[in-house]
Image: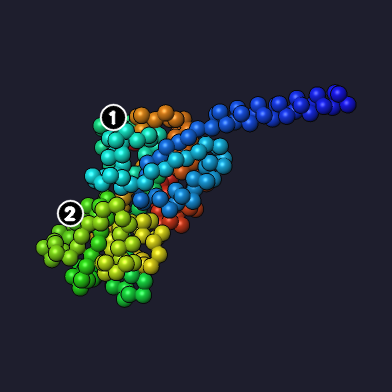
Amino acid sequence: MRSASAFRALTLAVIGALAFASAASAAEVHVMISGGLTAAYKALVPEFERKTGNKVVTAFGPSMGTTTNAIPVRLERGEPADVLIMVGYALGDLIKQGKVVADSRVDLVKSPIGIAVKSGAPRPDISSADSVKQALLAAKSVAYSDSASGVYVSTEMFAKLGIADQMKDKARMIPATPVGEIVARGEAEIGLQQISELKPVSGIDIVGPLPEPLQKITVFSAGIASVSKEPDAGKALISFLASPDARDALVNSGLDPIAAGATH
């Protein structure tokens, strides 16, 4: 009887030690991520946490700009960061500044720009560059993001269509807030943003992607912050997001996974 009690006590001690060791080895991974991957990321993080035992703490914000939640601004404030997931060229800028470990970059997905209208509103023809031009000219108001897609729309696409002057008074950049929410509230007739950022928003209809002559594909990439306290756990998260296990969630959110997570 005494031996059985001793064995039970020993077993409980071993289980307790294993649990303590597991808790001790679990890492808290701090992630800064921009909007393009948010929907897929939110679906995938619980699986990563379950598989690894690590806890993921996330801060959301645009890849660029000067708003308080923009990723570069968060880094300047000294917020904790292990993994950065953002527009590829913006991550490249941070690598040049020494804020991201150069050989840690992994290109995860390609993201096309789409056009949305309020649910139930007439869907404009966007099958060609000229039809997009006519739709934009006919709209009373147009909204675009303050991230990569919006920079392209405002500085290149309007000019390419020859309507830059006409857009000055009715097109506006939306900082921080998803463009789809502005369209859903009726504050803009047409919204332009990456499809992956439009998809999670209710109250809008996605008309479709921009036609090929106007399309601008954005690459979203991940890297390890130079100030990371958990680089190994961060690399594990990036590897998971680049793995076949993540593919379905990425595709379902309107993204095109980059095979094997190409590196730069």
Tell me if mark 1 has few (under 14), some (14-19) or many (20+) residues whose alpha carbon lies within 10 angstroms of its own.
few
Q: Position of residue 207 (x, y in %)?
A: 34, 68
Distance of label 1 from label 2 (alpha carbons): 28 Å
Would you say residue 224 is visible in this rendering?
A: no
Reply above or below: 255 against 12.
below
Reply above or below: 139 against 82.
below
- Looking at the rendered structure, the kind of residue marked 2 is Thr
Snapshot quadrant of residue 106? top left
Residue at 52% x, 46% y: name it.
46
Report the number of numbered marks.
2
Q: What is the quadrant of the N terminus in the image?
A: top right
Lateral position of residue 154 relative to residue 71, left or right: left
Of label 1 and label 2, which has the lower sequence position? 1
Lateral position of residue 5 relative to residue 122, left or right: right
Q: What is the quadrant of the C terminus in the image?
A: top left
Tell me if mark 2 has few (under 14), some (14-19) or many (20+) residues whose alpha carbon lies within 10 angstroms of its own.
few
Residue at 32% x, 33% y: name it.
78
Q: Position of residue 154 (x, y in %)?
A: 19, 56
In the picture of the structure, the residue carrying the numbered disc 2 is 155
Q: Position of residue 17 (x, y in %)?
A: 65, 26
Asked which secondary structure carries label 1, the reply is loop
Would you say residue 257 is visible in this rendering?
A: yes
- Residue extending farthest to the left is 165
Residue at 44% x, 48% y: name it.
41
Asked which secondary structure carries label 2, the reply is helix
Comparing 228 with 131, the one in front is: 228
- Looking at the rendered structure, the kind of residue marked 1 is Gly
The numbered disc on residue 98 is 1
Residue at 38% x, 43% y: name it.
59
Q: Position of residue 58 (x, y in %)?
A: 42, 43
